[in-house]
Each structure stands twice: as C-alpha cells, then as structure tokens.
Amino acid sequence: MIDKSWTKKDLLEIIKVYEIDIEDAKELSKKPLTEELYFQLLNTENYLDWNSEYPDVYVWNDLVELLEKPKANTELDYRQKQEIIHEAKTILNYCRNGYLLSNTEYECFDDIYLVALKVSQHCDISTCRRAIGEFNKDQKVRNPIEPKISQKMQKILEQKKINKAELTPKLFIRREPIHITFD
C-alpha cells in the first residue's frame, strides 16, 4: 500500500508525470486516490519514460517501491518555513539599509553571513532567493553564496523568464529605403 506520508498533491503530480489513466483524479479524496493509483501500478507492466524528478524510477515496480516507502521529507513544515522567511527578511533589511550592521540585530558580518548560508538552502522560496541575490551584491562578500534551487523550481523560473520576455514590448528600427507608390 502507498505510504501515508505522500500527500494528495504528490500523488497527482506522479499521475500527471507518468500519464497514469485515473478518471477524475483531482476530484477523488486522498484515500480513494491512493487505492486507485496502487491498483493501476500493480496491474501495469510497461517501462516508464525517465523523468528528472524521479531519476531512480525506470519500471512500474520501482515506482511502487518508491511509493510504499515514506516520502523523503525535504520540505519545511509551516513553522520552519516562517522562521526561514523571517531570517530572509532580516537579510533584506540589512541589504536595503545600506549594508550596515548597526540597523540589524547582528553583531558582526560573520553572523549575518551564517544566516545567509542557512537561508540559501531554501531558495525555492521567493523571499529567500531575493535575499540571497541582494546579499551577494554586498562588497564585503568575498565568496558569493550560491542559492540552492530545485530542478522543478528552475524550470518554473525559466518559463516565467520566457513568458516575461515575450510580453515585453519591443521596438525594431530598420534602416531601409521605403517605397511608396500612388496609383
């Protein structure tokens, strides 16, 4: 049976990624959805297309084994997420006040650098990405901090960048002779 640690959102994502045929999957509650998904996985024997989100899954049995184990909890719970966002906001406050420590609760630059390292591990959160981006502009930072962003979020950000570029008005200037004829 599918482990309870997998959320309905996770199961719907797996159904979408591997194109598993479950009728009205979004309408089902979690328990009937898990039962139907498990039934579908056990009664299918085909190979799966490789997917970067689940790189260890090649056949249906691998997917069944993955779902029977508890989900690897890489996400933050609500309280932890709020703490990380608060720390990111203190970094943003530091950056937007001229990179002055006197306006913060930190005593030295090393303290705020350590907090920035901690925040950089959760850059799927937009506030954290923004904080690290501005923190790296500080001239006291010798080694810029690399934000840790998941593959899924990188794809989303790239698509947003493409969409934004398409919506930006563009002006083209052509320096060609223009021929006007009157009949």
Image (spheres, rainbow, N blue to C red):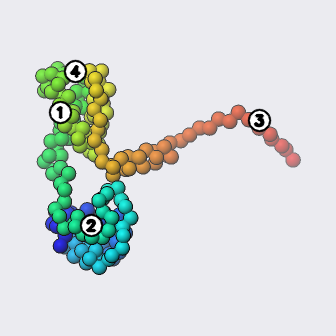
Query: Of 93 and 148, which appears nearest the observer?
Result: 148
Q: Are marks 2 and 4 in contact (CB under 8 Å)?
A: no
Give the amino acid type for the residue marked by disc 1 in the picture: Val
Give the amino acid type for the residue marked by disc 3 in the picture: Pro
Q: Quadrant of the N terminus?
A: bottom left
Task: Please give the name of the residue rendered at 18% of the width and 28% of the height, measured from the top-left corner.
Answer: 112
Q: Earlier in the sequence, mark 3 or mark 1?
A: 1
Q: Earlier in the sequence, mark 4 or mark 3?
A: 4
Q: Earlier in the sequence, mark 2 or mark 4?
A: 2
Task: Please give the name of the residue rendered at 22% of the width and 72% of the height, measured from the top-left corner.
Answer: 34
Task: Please give the name of the residue rendered at 23% of the width and 41% of the height, measured from the top-left corner.
Answer: 121
For mark 3, what is the residue? 177
For mark 1, what is the residue? 115
Quadrant for residue 42, please give it.
bottom left
Q: Secondary structure at mark 1?
A: helix
Q: Whole-Å distance between the Cαs marked 4 and 1?
A: 16 Å
Quadrant for residue 105, please give it.
top left
Q: Are marks 2 and 3 in contact (CB under 8 Å)?
A: no
Give the amino acid type for the residue marked by disc 2 in the picture: Asp
Q: Is residue 155 left or right of residue 170?
A: left
For mark 4, what is the residue? 100
For mark 2, what is the residue? 62
Q: Whole-Å distance between the Cαs marked 4 and 3?
A: 57 Å
Which tag is nearer the camera, tag 2 or tag 3? Answer: 2
Q: Secondary structure at mark 4?
A: loop
Q: Position of residue 78 (x, y in %)?
A: 15, 50
Task: Using the rendered image of the protein, determine whether residue 103 is visible from the camera's viewpoint.
Answer: no
Instruction: Please tell me how crowded label 2 is: few (under 14), some (14-19), or many (20+) other residues with Cα within 10 Å.
Output: few
Which tag is nearer the camera, tag 3 or tag 1? Answer: 1
Q: Secondary structure at mark 2?
A: helix
